[in-house]
Amino acid sequence: MKPFRYVEPATLAEASALLLQHAGQASLLAGGTDLLVEIKEQLRSPEIVINIKNLPELRGLEFDPVQGLFIGAMATARSIELSPLVQQHYPGLAQAARELGSIQVRNRATIVGNVCRASPSADSLPPLLADAARIHLHGAAGPRELALGEFFTGPGRTALQPGEIVTGIQLPAPQAGSGKSYIKHGRRKAMELATVGVAVSLQLRQGVLSEIAIVLGAVAPTAVHAPRAEALLRGRGITPALLAEAGAMAMQECTPISNVRASADYRRDMVGVLVQRALVQALAHAGHTLPVTPPANQNMQEGS
Amino acid sequence: MMNPSPNPSPSLTPSLTQTMAVAMTINGEPRQLLLDPWRSLLDVLRNEAGLTGTKKGCDVGDCGACTVIMDGVPVNACLVLGVEAQGSVIQTIEGLQPSPDTLHPLQHSFMQHGAAQCGFCTPGILMMAKALLDENPAPSEQEIRFGLAGNICRCTGYTKIIDAVSAAARQLRGEAA
């Protein structure tokens, strides 16, 4: 590894001041599973590495039935994967955490780090965005909060200002009738980057979808909502035909690229399939059972 | 090693040392090591601590050959800085045997099942399997496969490895292997 100076600040304010003072030349170290790889592969050459792991202000995972889930900057992917409360109330997020790297990686990697990396294929982003997460930042001017959707400005790019540190991510409390899911599609079962990821978060009231969010990963520069598919479903009763229609709609709303992992056409087709499956899973989580395999829609057959 | 920034700001000086004294417990033995902060725990274990049983495969967290148990949980030693291990308890393959003359049931089972070919991935797999069985003494085949997903063997398949872990689990539970 290229040599760097290493510092363990005692407070969040000190860490933020250091980051500001060395803007562009400093990297924060939390889990380290991305940072150390980037240093080794010379994708990044920080002059100073600021270890924020021992800051008293940074917290882990906290759940409150009214406030919801707070994913502190120190919460590891493994802690989220194993949390019974996350598994129960936020199964999409638990699934995304479970799909990230290996257990060895998940024991170190933080979800906040995964978010700050802002990879278009990051597993944690679709379920967090689908749940309308808010991100908490701390900088020289003090704390501020953003909708997570506003945090991502492009692949690997975020709204973080010089000196700002993400302190955590807040998810709303689950309500009766809420259902969530995440499906990752890759070429193998583990140690994989998503070819397509689909997260759904919905609210079912008397058989009608009162709220619905569909977020697609790895098919646009950032994880993106499928607003027309959401609009199609909102306020409607559920039928397999409607879910197929939503899948077809979502296919038109993504802008995938072709790369070593898959072609754009393949990714688009998989969006159609996975949106339906993710909807079925989220409905099941909300207590609404549908046939496990919705009928394939016309577009899918023509497109493949 | 060069110092990349010869003029650290005065306010930062107390914490901006280069070589750091780091205390950790490795396989039950307290160790004091002088470490440059950019050295990975893997390099520190292999060089400074002289424990070369932990292997360097990919060095970027993909292969699992460097798996050690840090404060009770398995990690890739290549993705941890040595200085981050300050105060930590580290278990490596050298500490798996209960005594010099006795094999750990996992080691014995790997021998019985022929669960190694070139053996390079074996220390990491044994440490991951130990962590897995510490957490779940009776894993299903699927759970063993899920647990070992971050440990890559490039010689051959995983069948004998899975069988060996499964048999060791039975033995550790006091059942016939």
Image (cartoon, rainbow, N blue to C red):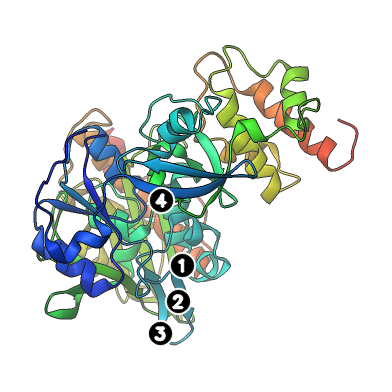
Kindly identify which residue carries mark 3: A67
Which is nearer the N-term, disc 2 or disc 1?
Answer: 1
- Assess disc 1: are there few (<14), some (14-19) or many (≥20) residues with their C-alpha within 10 Å of its C-alpha: many
The circle drawn on residue A90 is 1
Q: Are marks 2 and 1 in contact (CB under 8 Å)?
A: no
Q: Chain of mark 3?
A: A
**Residue at 11% across, 46% down:** B5
Q: Element type at marker 4?
A: helix
**Residue A135 visible:** no
Looking at the picture, tell me which residue is in the foreground, A29 or A230. A29
Task: Say if labels 3 and 4 share a chain.
Answer: no
Task: Say if labels 1 and 3 share a chain.
Answer: yes
Spot occupied by residue A262 in the image (x, y as percentages of width and height): 26, 31
Type of amino acid under label 2: Gly
Point out the image quarter for the N terminus of chain B. Answer: top left
Type of amino acid under label 3: Gln
The circle drawn on residue B84 is 4
Spot occupied by residue A108 in the image (x, y as percentages of width and height): 43, 51
Q: What's the CA distance linking mark 4 and mark 2? A: 52 Å
Q: What's the CA distance linking mark 3 and mark 4? A: 33 Å
Kindly identify which residue carries mark 2: A207
